[in-house]
Amino acid sequence: DSGSSSSSCKSQFRFATGIQGKITRTAYMRLEDELSQCQEKLLECNLVIKRLEEQFAKVKENERKLRPMSLLEGEKNLLTGRSKELKLNTNVASELEIENLRKSSIALQKENKRLSDKLKESELKIQFEKRERENAEQELALLMGHQNT
């Protein structure tokens, strides 16, 4: 009987923001899942940032290696102009992408923290409610024991 009541049992709780709500085991598990997803997204973003930084370093290294090559003056000027334009475009695009990924990473870190805090709050609430229920059961057992005597 206690198994069926625990699955339908909803508990009152109040978020740090003051919003009152009910928490169920399903909601708790969903919060855990959302937190896990945020952590995965954060890891993916950090990997993308690392890959882009490595690619950017390779472009810089390739550019450094290309400088000593001797070209005809006209071709050299043309290539230099195009290289600068490409470098600028690549640098701007890479920096924008890295900045966007950093912003996304920061947002995911904040969301991760929010969900982690929410999960901790839910865990504490569940522990508190469990203790309350255990205390109530003990009081009831004591009352029942006194009535029988």
Image: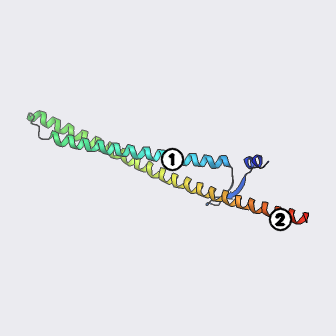
Horizontally, residue 116 falls left or right of residue 52, namely: right
Q: Residue at x 11, y 37 (%)?
A: 69
Residue 38: image location, x then y, percent: 51, 47
Q: Position of residue 4 (x, y in %)?
A: 77, 46
Picture disc at residue 21: none
Residue beneath disc 1:
38
Contact, mark 2 vs mark 1 (Cβ under 8 Å): no
Which residue position is annotated with label 2? 142
Question: Looking at the picture, which amino acid does disc 1 mark?
Answer: Cys
The answer to which image quadrant residue 133 occupies is bottom right
Give the quadrant of residue 79.
top left
Q: Is residue 25 left or right of residue 90?
A: right
Residue at horizontal 8 percent and vertical 33 percent from the top: 72
Q: Residue 22 versus residue 149: which sits nearer the camera?
A: 149
Please tell me which of labels 2 and 1 falls first in the chain. Answer: 1
Spot occupied by residue 106 in the image (x, y as percentages of width and height): 45, 52
Amino acid type at circle 2 is: Leu
Q: Which residue is found at the position 34% from the left and 42% from the top?
A: 51
| Crowd around label 2: few <14 · some 14–19 · many ≥20 (10 Å) | few
What residue is at 56 percent from the left and 46 percent from the top? 34
Q: Nearer the viewer, residue 82 or 17?
A: 17
Residue 81 higher or lower than 42, as above or below: above
**Would residue 91 be found to the left or right of residue 104 on screen?**
left
Is residue 20 left or right of 99 when viewed as pictured?
right
